[in-house]
Amino acid sequence: MISEEIRDADKYAQMALNYKGENIALSDTFFKLSQEEMNHMSMLHDQAARLIDAYRKEHGDPPAEMQAVYDYLHERQMDEAAQVKAKQMLYRE
């Protein structure tokens, strides 16, 4: 679901940029929606981190395969989130 939130945030950020010079009310709405989606992403990420911490406290380190999947997804998602944040910064300029 984290990836879905990032994709939606990206779509909204792109739409905000597309309408920025043309329709400020619409572009502002898309920008706010993008920010909200990134907030959703952050909330889900926090919960994933909480669950991992709880697992570690109860069972120790997760299996290597599980950690590898998490590391891969986390890196990809953080790269994608950074791209969305860059678009949001462009909108603010």
Image: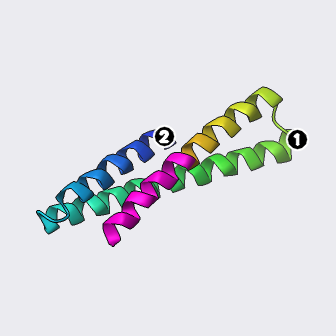
Report the amino acid beneath label 2. Answer: Ser
For the question of whether residue 81 can be seen, the reply is yes
Q: Which residues are magenta?
A: 79-93
Give SS at disc 2: helix
Which residue is pictured at 61% across the width and 37% down the height?
A: 73
Q: CA distance from mark 1 to mark 2?
A: 27 Å
Which residue is pictured at 81% across the width and 35% down the height?
A: 62
For the question of whether residue 1 can be seen, the reply is no
View extreme (bottom): residue:
93
Q: Is residue 67 left or right of residue 42?
A: right
Give SS at disc 1: loop
Say which residue label 2 marks: 3
Q: How is the image coloured?
A: rainbow
Q: Is residue 30 left or right of residue 48?
A: left
Residue 28's place in the image compared with 43, above or below, is below
Report the amino acid beneath label 1. Answer: Gly
Per the picture, the main secondary structure of the magenta-coloured stretch is: helix
Q: Is residue 92 left or right of residue 52?
A: left
Which quadrant of the figure has residue 26?
Answer: bottom left
Looking at the rendering, in which quadrant would you find the C terminus?
bottom left
Camera-near label (1 vs 2) is 2
Say which residue label 1 marks: 60
Say whether disc 1 or disc 2 marks the residue closer to the N-terminus: 2
Residue 1, x across and y down, in percent: 48, 39
View extreme (top): residue:
65
Which residue is pictured at 37% across the width and 51% down the height?
A: 9
| Front residue of this view, candidates 25 and 51 | 25
Residue 41's place in the image compared with 24, above or below, is above
Would you say residue 72 sits in the magenta stretch?
no
Badge 1 density bin: few <14, some 14–19, many ≥20, Cα 10 Å: few
Would you say residue 92 sits in the magenta stretch?
yes
